[in-house]
Amino acid sequence: ERQIFVTRHGESEDNITGRIGGDAPLSDKGKKFAKALAKFVQSQRIKFACELASKESELEPEGQQDFAKALQTTAKFCNSPFTIWTSMLQRSMQTAEYFDPDDYDIKHIRFLNEINSGICEGMTYQEIQQTHPSEYRSRQANKLFYRYPGMGGESYIDVIHRLQPMIVELERMTQSCLIITHRVVMRILLGYLLDWTREEMPHMMVPIHTVYELRPKPYGTELKKWQYIE
Ligand code: G3H
């Protein structure tokens, strides 16, 4: 059994002004979320280790649950490896800054970057609507297939394709992990883990400062959602 945590980065300077894309750093509020996230994940990890340890000790024959062994089993689960993946954008990497690198295996992966919005990078939705009204309308009409024009511009479908290797790796690995990413990537990853259709994905609500905890089980995935409130 393992825990999969998925969240967006903490609030960035661009989130405050409503700009999409870019590579802005975290705002002060975003840094507070990052600090709280490290404490939260650590506590959930310990709680989970205790759950696993108590399940294991239940397997011991009646009257033979020895104290030292129980502590040892809990320590074993507490020390089991835990991976953190972030994108290669500042706001995502900074959200992982408060995790102890001795306790977590932290990797920055370009595949987890936010959708590339081509010529619309750094703009607000209002600016896009004013300066590129037909692009804005086309995206509204078909958000899944719409590809932003300009160098490297992507559609949701493009991002779904670039995430395939990450999904394969996520399925393959047995350890618990935390993925710190962006709105589009998060919609796709959650969509995959929770069986949302491709058509639903671009429209799902995935607010910042919300952590999804998923536990894959033989009969489906258990989901818990946690919100950070200052
Ligand atoms: O920076 C990109 C946005 O987070 C994407 O959100 O697909 O709902 O426009 P959207």
Image: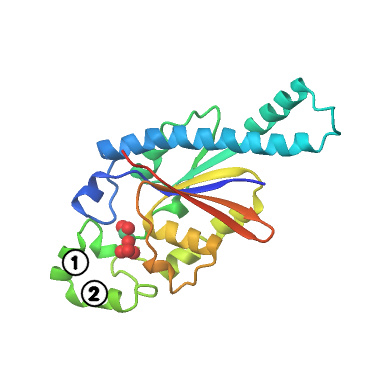
The amino acid type found where label 1 is placed reads Ile
The amino acid type found where label 2 is placed reads Glu
Closest to the observer, 73 or 54? 54
Task: Specify few, some or many for label 1: CA neighbours under 10 Å numbering under 14, 14-19, or 20 or more.
Answer: some
Q: Is mark 2 within 8 Å of ligand 1?
A: no
Image position, residue 101 (x, y; %): 51, 29
Q: Residue at x 18, y 72 (%)?
A: 132
Q: Earlier in the sequence, mark 1 or mark 2?
A: 1
In space, the residues marked 1 and 2 are separated at their CA atoms by 8 Å
Q: Which residue is mark 2?
A: 135
Marks 1/2 in contact by CB < 8 Å: the verdict is yes
Which residue lies most toward the left here? 130
Q: Residue at x 56, y 58 (%)?
A: 167
Q: Is mark 1 within 8 Å of ligand 1?
A: no
* Residue 80 seen by the camera: no
* Residue 161 seen by the camera: yes
Q: Which residue is mark 1?
A: 128
The part of the image, by quadrant, that contains residue 49 is top right
Q: Residue at x 73, y 26 (%)?
A: 70
Q: Give the secondary structure at mark 2.
A: helix
* Image position of 29 (left or right of 73): left
Image position, residue 78 (x, y; %): 63, 31
The image quadrant where one finds the C terminus is top left
Closest to the observer, 30 or 119? 30
Q: Give the secondary structure at mark 1.
A: helix
Coloring scheme of the render?
rainbow
Image position, residue 89 (x, y; %): 36, 46
Q: Residue at x 44, y 56 (%)?
A: 186
Image position, residue 166 (x, y; %): 54, 55
Q: Quadrant of ligand 1?
A: bottom left
Task: Specify few, some or many for label 2: CA neighbours under 10 Å numbering under 14, 14-19, or 20 or more.
Answer: some
What number of labels is visible? Answer: 2
